[in-house]
Amino acid sequence: MNLPHSMDGGLKRRESLVEGNKRKTGSIPLVAEDLGIITDEVEALRDEFDFPGMKILQFAFGSGPDNPYLPDHYEKELALFIQALMI
């Protein structure tokens, strides 16, 4: 993975955390909470550990056919939320 040099130390800590969790718990599925502003670095970390991301179906409607929350744009397994709690 090609991450900026400033992220190298953080990545090693994250790898250690993820691998340690796998050793202790086995293969309990994890989902990456990747809602909000998603940078290339966030996507790289999520993909490095093969975690599914999230989509909220409620966000899919009203902004046109290119909206990444539309089901036709889902590229891989993910956790789909039908509605987000808006306070």
Image: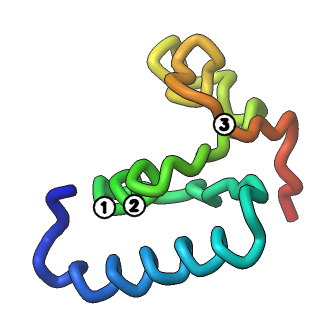
- Position of residue 51 measured from the top left corner of the image (x, y, whole percent): 57, 50
* In this rendering, position of residue 13 left or right of residue 36: left
Q: Which residue is mark 2?
A: 45
* Contact flag, marks 1 and 2 (Cβ < 8 Å): yes
* In this rendering, position of residue 86 left or right of residue 3: right
Q: Which residue is mark 1?
A: 41
- Residue at 62% x, 20% y is 70
| Amino acid of disc 3 | Leu
- Is residue 36 depicted above or below 76 in this figure? below
Q: Which residue is mark 3?
A: 78
| Amino acid of disc 2 | Leu
Q: CA distance from mark 2 to mark 3?
A: 15 Å
Dot 3 alpha-carbon crowd within 10 angstroms: few under 14, some 14 to 19, many 20 or more: some
Dot 2 alpha-carbon crowd within 10 angstroms: few under 14, some 14 to 19, many 20 or more: some
- Position of residue 10 measured from the top left corner of the image (x, y, whole percent): 34, 85
Q: CA distance from mark 3 to mark 1?
A: 18 Å
- Is residue 15 depicted above or below 37 in this figure? below
Q: CA distance from mark 1 to mark 2?
A: 6 Å
